[in-house]
Image (cartoon, helix red, strand yellow):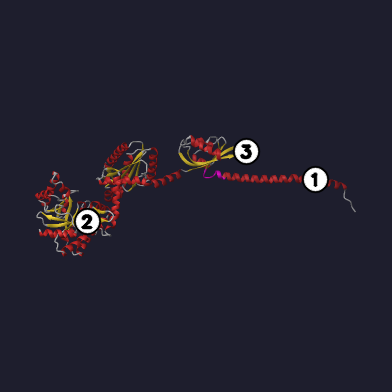
């Protein structure tokens, strides 16, 4: 048996111990090397990411804890104009626009100190001096001990975004044609003014403005001329106002002027309203020179005051609109203040209109007939006068419902019903042996201007087997205004078919001998307003006398309405008037009553 060398056995533990010692040293070093390698690789990756980030579209600026700039990226130079050489070592104050106060920057520092970050809009200045808006975020960088070591800022130019916002706001709140605020912005501003007025016990003024005759200009000269006229009107209105007041285009040719709430007593505001309204009217009355056309328009203005107490935007606009229509009715080119009585008139009108639409269907209309007589007391005709009895409104005067029927267009169907009813009644009169030479029927301008008026009228009388000369068509001068040639053509066509014409209310409108000369009238009717003042007013007497002389020279027969007294009759017969109509002879009668009247009259 061979024995192991004892010296080897002695050195073996030493070798093992040495090996273990080496392992104990090498493994931690290897681990630390591996960790360091990984850290270096991560740092390299982070550096690459940071380098890529610095190449981003956003401008980046890094400062030390004392806000000295130590690093920027290329986008910073592109955005501000400052190169790295020019900006390193400077503070961000070099970019200050001067548009922000100390409080603005205090709020930024408060956010950085409390939250470690801030973000928002800020105005900065480029190297060339241009001021621009930017969106900026700032973050505070802290070390392991929580101490701020750096600040890093990212920002982008938002000029185009702000332009887009302004454009969106402009589209939403401003009229695209005139550049004035629109209805939506008016609602916001007026709501604000109402709150201010109520809170501080103030009052303001609201004007509602509508251009007179604008539609005529727009239709005759074209929309391009009309648009230019509206643009210049807007400019003129703005020139009259203070910075605190607002001119608004509601749409079409309607404008509103809002005078901001202010301290002052009621009478002072009324005086101020008068002054402003007169300035507006004078400014609008100045001639407009548009593309070689010299144009003249006027304005009707409604005015209301506001205090903000129990008032809404809708209420105020309704009041001013009501007052504006009162100005229209007063002759245009003027202004009127809102009163509750005005609103009552509007509410009544709407109520009448609602019921008027049902009246024909419900057979609420009837025809009354007022006799027309000659100087020798012979019945020469009768006028058909519509009457309305409503279950809710009671008896409604034609003075109240005919203008509403005209405005709404209901007069067309009502007028057709009258013609048909009169034709039916003429047939009944003949069957009863009642002889009335003709029945006068009032024709409205709207009815006359219908394209099928002539053919429809001819068809109606022939269908009911009524001779056309049994109907006297009464038309006013309003029929001829604006289109004389159309009136001539239609009247001539009807004359050829046997109809006769009477011009009603002569002398109360735009009376012109041209009409009488060119149009085929048979009769001229002297308005009752002249007859009423015949005895006591020398001017009315002179006018009536002149009308009589003129009518005779043109071979027109004459009839005077509104004859109520013996004196009226004596004056008119003395002037040479032919026929008469009025309460002196008879009030308007139902069909049954006029039959009795004619029968009794024939016995006398």
- Label 2 vs 1, first from the N-terminus: 1
* Closest to the observer, 243 or 569: 569
Mark 3, Cα crowd under 10 Å, few <14 / some 14-19 / many 20+, is: few
* Closest to the observer, 455 or 549: 549
| Residue 54 part of the magenta segment | yes
- Marker disc for residue 66: none
Provide residue 570's location: percent of width, then percent of height. Answer: 10, 49
Residue at x-position 10% and y-position 60%: 603
Residue 235 vs 1, above or below: the answer is above
Residue position marked by numbered label 2 in the rendering? 386
Q: Which region shows up in magenta?
A: 52-58
Residue position marked by numbered label 3 in the rendering? 145
Residue position marked by numbered label 1 in the rendering? 17
Q: Does residue 127 appear to the left or right of 219 in the view shown?
A: right
- Asked if disc 2 and disc 1 are in contact, CB closer than 8 Å, the reply is no
Provide residue 44's location: percent of width, then percent of height. Answer: 62, 45
- Asked if disc 1 and disc 3 are in contact, CB closer than 8 Å, the reply is no
User: Do we see residue 232 in this rendering?
Assistant: no
């Amino acid at each position: 048996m061979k024995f192991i060398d004892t010296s080897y056995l002695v050195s073996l533990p030493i070798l093992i111990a040495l090996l273990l010692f080496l392992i104990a040293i090498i493994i931690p070093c290897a681990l630390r090397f591996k960790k360091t390698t990984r850290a270096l690789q991560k740092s390299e990756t982070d550096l690459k990411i940071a380098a890529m980030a610095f190449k981003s579209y956003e401008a980046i600026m890094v400062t030390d804890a004392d806000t000295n700039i130590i690093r920027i990226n290329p986008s910073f130079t592109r955005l501000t104009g400052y190169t790295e050489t020019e900006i390193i070592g400077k503070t961000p104050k070099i970019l200050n626009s001067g548009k922000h106060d100390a409080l603005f920057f205090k709020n930024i520092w408060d956010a950085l100190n409390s939250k470690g970050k801030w973000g928002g809009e800020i105005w900065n200045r480029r190297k060339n001096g241009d001021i621009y808006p930017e969106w900026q975020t700032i973050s505070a960088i802290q070390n392991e001990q929580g101490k701020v070591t750096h600040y890093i800022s990212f920002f982008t130019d938002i000029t185009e975004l702000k332009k887009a916002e302004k454009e969106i706001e402009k589209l939403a709140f401003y009229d695209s044609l005139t550049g004035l605020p629109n209805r939506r912005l008016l609602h916001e501003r007026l709501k604000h003014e109402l709150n201010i007025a109520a809170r501080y016990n103030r009052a303001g003024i609201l004007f509602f403005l509508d251009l007179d005759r604008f539609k005529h200009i727009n239709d005759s000269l074209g929309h391009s001329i009309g648009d230019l006229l509206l643009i210049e009107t807007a400019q003129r209105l703005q020139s009259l106002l203070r910075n605190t007041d607002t001119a608004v285009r509601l749409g079409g040719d309607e404008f509103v002027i809002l005078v901001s709430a202010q301290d002052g007593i009621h009478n002072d505001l009324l005086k101020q309203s008068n002054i402003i309204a007169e300035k507006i009217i004078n400014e609008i009355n100045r001639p407009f020179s548009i593309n070689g056309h010299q144009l003249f328009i006027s304005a009707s203005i409604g005015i209301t005051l506001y205090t903000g107490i129990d008032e809404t935007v809708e209420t105020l606009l309704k009041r001013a609109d009501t007052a504006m229509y009162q100005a229209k009715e007063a002759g245009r080119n003027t202004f009127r203040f809102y009163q509750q009585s005005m609103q009552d008139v509007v509410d009544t009108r709407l109520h009448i209109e609602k019921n008027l639409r049902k009246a024909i269907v419900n057979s609420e209309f009837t025809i009354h007939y007022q006799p027309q007589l000659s100087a020798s007391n012979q019945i020469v005709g009768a006028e058909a006068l519509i009457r309305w009895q409503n279950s809710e409104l009671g008896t409604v005067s034609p003075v109240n419902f005919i203008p509403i029927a005209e405005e709404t267009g209901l007069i067309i169907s009502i007028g057709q019903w009258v013609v048909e009813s009169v034709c039916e009644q003429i047939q009944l009169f003949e069957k009863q042996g009642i002889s009335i030479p003709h029945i006068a029927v009032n024709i409205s301008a709207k009815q006359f201007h219908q394209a099928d008026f002539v053919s429809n009228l001819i068809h109606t009388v022939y269908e009911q087997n009524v001779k056309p000369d049994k109907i006297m068509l009464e038309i006013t001068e309003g029929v001829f205004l604006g289109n004389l040639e159309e009136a001539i053509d239609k009247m001539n066509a009807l004359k050829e078919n046997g109809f006769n014409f009477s011009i009603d209310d002569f002398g109360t409108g735009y009376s012109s001998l041209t009409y009488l000369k060119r149009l085929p009238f048979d009769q001229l009717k002297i308005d009752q307003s002249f007859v009423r003042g015949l005895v006591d007013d020398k001017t009315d007497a002179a006018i009536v006398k002149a009308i009589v002389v003129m009518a005779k020279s043109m071979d027109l027969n004459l009839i005077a309405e509104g004859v109520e007294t013996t004196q009226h009759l004596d004056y008119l017969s003395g002037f040479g008037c032919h026929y008469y109509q009025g309460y002196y002879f008879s009030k308007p009668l139902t069909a049954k009553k006029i039959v009795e009247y004619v029968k009794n009259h024939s016995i006398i």
